[in-house]
Image: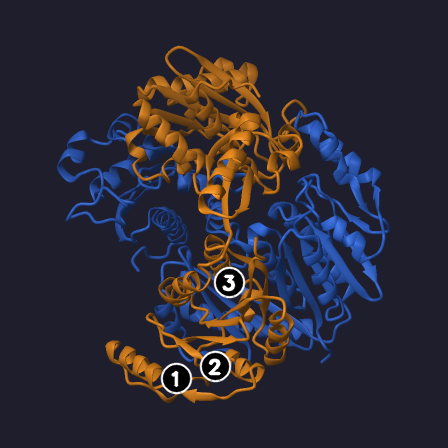
Chain colours: A orange, B blue
Amino acid sequence: MEKSITAHIITIGDEILIGQVLNTNAAYIGSQLSKINIEVKNASIVGDIEEEIIAEFKNVWDKNDIIFVTGGLGPTHDDVTRKCVVKFFNTELEESKEVLANITELYKKRGREITKTAKGQALVPKNARIINNQKGTAPGFWIEKGNKLFIVMPGVPFEMTAMMEETIIPELVGKYKSLDYVIKMTTLLTTGIPESHLSDRLGDINELLSGSKLAFLPSQYGVRLRITVKETSEEEAKNKLSEIEQKIRAKAGRYIYGKDDDTLEEIIGKLLKDRGLKIAVAESCTGGNLANRITNVSGSSEYFERGVVSYSNAAKVEILKVNEDTILEHGAVSLQVARQMAEGIKSTSGTDIGISLTGIMGPTGASIDKPIGLVYIGLCDDKVCTAKKFLFGDDRILNKQRASQTALDMLRKYLLGISLDD
Amino acid sequence: MEKSITAHIITIGDEILIGQVLNTNAAYIGSQLSKINIEVKNASIVGDIEEEIIAEFKNVWDKNDIIFVTGGLGPTHDDVTRKCVVKFFNTELEESKEVLANITELYKKRGREITKTAKGQALVPKNARIINNQKGTAPGFWIEKGNKLFIVMPGVPFEMTAMMEETIIPELVGKYKSLDYVIKMTTLLTTGIPESHLSDRLGDINELLSGSKLAFLPSQYGVRLRITVKETSEEEAKNKLSEIEQKIRAKAGRYIYGKDDDTLEEIIGKLLKDRGLKIAVAESCTGGNLANRITNVSGSSEYFERGVVSYSNAAKVEILKVNEDTILEHGAVSLQVARQMAEGIKSTSGTDIGISLTGIMGPTGASIDKPIGLVYIGLCDDKVCTAKKFLFGDDRILNKQRASQTALDMLRKYLLGISLDD
């Protein structure tokens, strides 16, 4: 196979460096390039300082086939990118009639008169190919030199993405269509198993992958497994991906709830709809986090009947019909109360399934018997009523997220007939 | 004034390069450093490839006072950062008893047995100072060489931020306390007013700032106003900041709910506690989003009694005692139902205040009279029962967030005696 076509992405702007604005542009460009077999080797962020920008151009030029630059193309004093490009390529600026017409048109459309500052944006590096900006005034441009590409776009996300979609991606696909390799990725989403256990379960990674790549991406919601293959044809890449996916599923299938952009709440939504089942939830410790996630899915009113955030014991007794004596005897955070909450929300709402959570999220509220992170999750249908104990960490918000993720995963396993025991 | 202390941030991970994960770590580190007078000159992202990582270490080492590295410290085969650090500093790995004890403890807490893979994380570069990981297993470390600092942290955001807050920031503040300039920032948090209206209200920005900087940062929660001053002493910086803050408050005070890291749910929590008042909430369209936010605040059980997510009409009638005829006549999304939901949750829970939301979040469920984004918010106490109509946008998740933010802001204004009319 040929060597990969490689790219470097430079984002220009102080606001990115000081974390005022997230670097969504580099993420977008990276995701688009990885879909068309171009490998993003590195990316960098540089402030609005001429010397720094030119130094970075020099630094990355030799090492890559394509350089992407976004930001610093606007009309104000702190937009220095064009100046830097001109110096780097040892050329000069000239007015583009095409761009000037575009800017004039845009101002007319918005009922404004064109200013001198705005006109200045029609100045582009000599011999650069212009990339039309359909959403704003600053044009992008594309410089080709010795088999290398240098592509410059504005930093405003919707202007940049429009240029990528309409011009740059189609051009690159055409330019590199004779590549003799195809890169493909898929991500398997797991939950309920720590990274190191999952790794142990998969066994010999090299044997599993036979030349492809696997990345472990952990978060409070679980570990994502990203598989990347590089093959000589679309079909071979697809086959290789599916072969590795099947091997992983054979070893850790019960922990995998979805793929790529799936969310667990969407997955359980589909399962509930397919089976024509309705649920209701009773939350104490998660305080509405679970209901909020379930209702993030459009169409959830088809299967989600109601939720109760029974923060007080009174709410547990009055709405969920939890036995007051059980609370007195075992405490509100107990297996017994979790079970009664799930049973209570199911019977009072008339749904097929009731789910409940009660626990201690921290930082306060712990006792010797009941540490921070202790959560009981209950699940009842017409026949069975079960509750399980979990121990999460010591961060309140993460504990809420972990607990609701675990409750959704319990529901998934229940709906698929997978044992709830780990 | 002295030359600034400069830093470079390296984020390691293919998932960042291909845009699968946003680079929130670099943004967070950048924002923290800019608060303590350290200038982030550049940042870069490198994939999980040894040679590339080491090349980047070499590339940035000479140019900066501090190098931050995050990512690639986990227990699996694709985590290569430690290996690269060891090669770059020409040292070796050794097992840290302290770290091993921490990992063992963490596994014990979660009721799991420690695996060989997990144990491997106790290997750290010789002579490196360990930064304890209170939230996970992979330790961070800190290498000092010839007046330069090399700081390595895991890529899991909550592990990294805990290390920054608890160890790194305090250490850096101590180390660089003798600088002869002070950069200070503060951010005022507004909601309920669009960016352009806010800007018009503030009038002549240059006159307002007299040399300092102001940034407008809009999001679905409102517009943040960040003020940055650079002065020669702590006191001058503080005075300048407070002077500008007061000018802004004089012009837009009623829209400002807090400062810096405040959240609106914390602010209303304090107000409720101070006044000894209790609330309960009834949510339809927000599906638990409001209750979830209120209960994100530690100690919220003191003032939050219960929440009901009355997604079905049955739940509205049964739990909240909404009149069935009112639903038939005006529809579930109406001023009348919002008022009855707020009244119902207040009276059935016995709290001082009841809040309700009913609306159409999209993408489906709209009619000619009732478009996507229409939300009614009700607020009742023992004397008054009011409801207001709002029209948000067409994105389901953003609408839920905007609606709960607006409900919290209505409560804030009510508690402070500010008119609910805009």
Q: Chain of mark 1?
A: A
Q: Is residue A265 left or right of residue B43?
A: left
- Look at mark 1 in the image and give the residue it sits on: A122
Q: What is the secondary structure assignment of the residue under circle 1? A: helix
Q: What is the secondary structure assignment of the residue under circle 2? A: helix
Q: Are marks 3 and 1 in contact (CB under 8 Å)?
A: no
- Quarter of the image with the C terminus of chain A in it: top right
Q: What number is the disc on residue B206?
A: 2
Which one is nearer the viewer's eye here, A124 or B73?
Answer: A124
Q: For the point 17% across and 35% down, which residue is it? A: B326
Q: Is residue B288 left or right of residue B188?
A: left
Alpha carbon separation for disc pair 3 and 1: 27 Å
- Look at mark 3 in the image and give the residue it sits on: A21
Q: Is residue A239 visible?
A: yes
Q: Three-letter amino acid code at disc 1?
A: Ala
Residue B199 appears at what percent x and percent y? 39, 72
Residue A60 appears at what percent x and percent y? 62, 69
Q: Are marks 2 and 3 in contact (CB under 8 Å)?
A: no
Q: Is residue B25 left or right of residue A187?
A: right
Q: What number is the disc on residue A7?
A: none
Query: Does A56 appear above or below B19?
Result: below
Q: What is the secondary structure assignment of the residue under circle 3? A: loop
Instruction: Report whether mark 1 lies on the same chain as mark 2.
Output: no
